[in-house]
Image: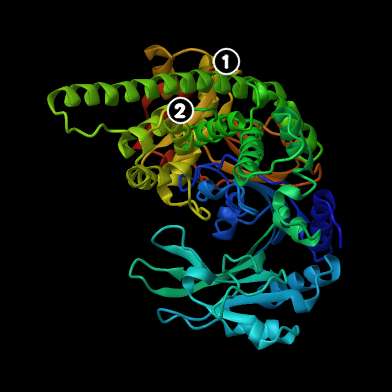
Amino acid sequence: MKITADQLRNLYLEFFKSKGHAVISGASLIPENDPTVLFTTAGMHPLVPYLMGKMPHPAGTRLTDVQKCVRTGDIDEVGDSAHLTFFEMLGNWSLNDYFKKEAIGWSFEFLTTKLGFSPDQLSVTVFKGEEGIPADEEAAAIWKSLGIPDERIYRLPREDNWWGPAGETGPCGPDTEMFIDTGKPACGPDCRPGCHCGKFIEIWNDVFMQFNKTAEGKFEPLGRHNVDTGMGVERTICMMNGLDTVYDTDVFAPIMAKIKELSGKASFETPEDVRSSRVVADHMRTATFILGDQKGGVTPGNVGANYVLRRLIRSAVRHARRLGIAPGFTEKMAATIVDEYKHVYPELEANRERVFQELLAEETRFGKTLDEGKREFDKTVAGIRRKNEFMGAKDPAYVPETQISGKQAFRLYDTYGYPLEMTQELAREIGFTVDVAGYQECFKAHQKLSRANVGSAKSGLAEHSEETTALHTATHLLHKALKIVLGDHCNQKGSNITAERLRLDFTHGEKMTPEQIRKVEDIVNEQIKADLPVYRDMMTLDEARAAGATALFSNKYTDEKLSVYTMGRTREDFFSKEVCTGPHVEHTGVLGHFKIKKEESSSAGVRRIKAVLEK
């Protein structure tokens, strides 16, 4: 069955709508109040409070959506047939509603009746049992009842078929993964789903949250059961259309065509050129979605999500140069990507000019850095030659060095963005070599340090403790206080909350004065002292705005119900009213004393405040 990405999205949502699911809007790529990840890595991120049972979801207990996701844990694998840093995730959820029988049954029904896969193509994995947790024979029995024979039901350990907890404790449970047999020969007697030889491709994952891991390491029944599922759009249409790689799908077709046009090549023949073209396509798509996100706030920088974005753009620039693509290409690539996706994600069109400006600025900055790197390479070689000349004059038997050390090669990569192959190419031209083993040692050490910086977590589950709930509530008070003191142009561009502090990024063009900071603190503390009740109501986006709520995004589905939190004497006489997923305290008097610890620049036109609640 041939299928496009648009058709797959619609098929999926309509199927689960027919099963009683409410279709909800996907969330921002920038997680709200979740310090465990830098980007939204799965559809469950915006549903955390509801999965945890903190509150009911406005749309009910059965939900489905399409979620934009960024995962960079495998960023160095991009360029093969399947790895991507940005992808679309189809998902459906049960919030203490249906469980394994329905979830597995509907997965099987959708794969076979809607997507047309033969049951004979399907292999599945289930949790085999470990650390005193019984095997998930319930899931296995359901698959058998649907006609999947036992020899295609693989029982695997926790590292393969278990989700969570995100931290040391919390909700977790077994999962069942679905794989399509591509028909390729097995790589050996141990070949099975999860093997990387290409015979089995994972298409869907159903997670069953039924346990809670305690501080003592015990797995106890959670007391509620949730289902969290995920199906990747790109991989699914790749398999359904019988294509070799995700880069051959309809979503990548115009992007790859633009790369060929800009490079002046009708096709890419060498493995190196093929990989470079895919890296440019993937990284430019991801960077465009991050910069064009509805929440915004992430620009190229040196820390956290900003660092990831910079790394993606600079890697795309390096590989574009390899392909002979002229400077200024990032804007042209982004225009193609925006045009391809704007009918699904209108925020890309709304932020088109901002995307172009940030990409061109970073491309220009990095171009200068690459030129500096070439000068640094020349200096490194000159230093080696001076040493050879000096040592040769002292000792006629001295053998001249013609190798750039691993440390020197890695410095060219880390500081100036020169990949190893570029340094090797320059070295070959002058009869030098590069200590590749030494470079790899430096690179591995760097990876250990930077993995936390690129958000390699599989998926995050925010810690909604009393501390984070209080700081989340205080963030709303801070947001309104900033508008009062600095002006209504102050809009939230991102937030990050841990148990110790809150961090809020907001639009403002200049450094706050000490007097302005004191005024903001005083306003927030006045609202805390007033012990305002916090109300939660459910309404559509239009209804929320009509009621005076702040909502810094547009909603795809006009009838979708959202949570609106009001802090005031009444719902009509309020200090703050915002659309938000929550959770919040019940009244502001429990928050303690609000104190701003730091006010600084986050990026051009965006300031950042870090603050605490003192008891």
State the quadrant of the C terminus.
top left
| Location of residue 609 in the rendering, given as x and y in whole percent from the top left corner | 43, 26
Dot label at residue 524: 2
In this figure, what is the number of numbered marks? 2
Colour scheme used in the picture?
rainbow
- Seen from the viewer's position, the closer of residues 151 and 274 is 274
Q: CA distance from mark 2 to mark 1?
A: 16 Å
- Seen from the viewer's position, the closer of residues 373 and 584 is 373
- Whether residue 59 is visible, yes or no, is no
Identified by mark 1, the residue type is: Gly
Dot label at residue 347: none
Q: For residue 226, which quarter of the picture?
A: bottom right
- Whether residue 73 is visible, yes or no, is yes
Of circles 2 and 1, the one toward us is: 1
- Which residue is identified by label 1? 487
- In this view, the residue farthest toward the front is 396
In the shown orientation, is residue 252 left or right of residue 169?
A: right
| Location of residue 433 in the rendering, given as x and y in whole percent from the top left corner | 38, 37
State the quadrant of the N terminus.
bottom right
- Mark 1 secondary-structure assignment: loop
Above/below status of 161 relative to 437: below
Q: Residue at x 41, y 63 (%)?
A: 169
Above/below status of 37 relative to 158: above
Q: Residue at x 33, y 47 (%)?
A: 441
- In this view, the residue farthest toward the left is 394
Identified by mark 2, the residue type is: Val
- Seen from the viewer's position, the closer of residues 551 and 524 is 551
Callout 2: 10 Å neighbours few (<14), some, many (20+)? many
- Mark 2 secondary-structure assignment: helix
- Seen from the viewer's position, the closer of residues 319 and 265 is 265
Q: Residue at x 44, y 45 (%)?
A: 468
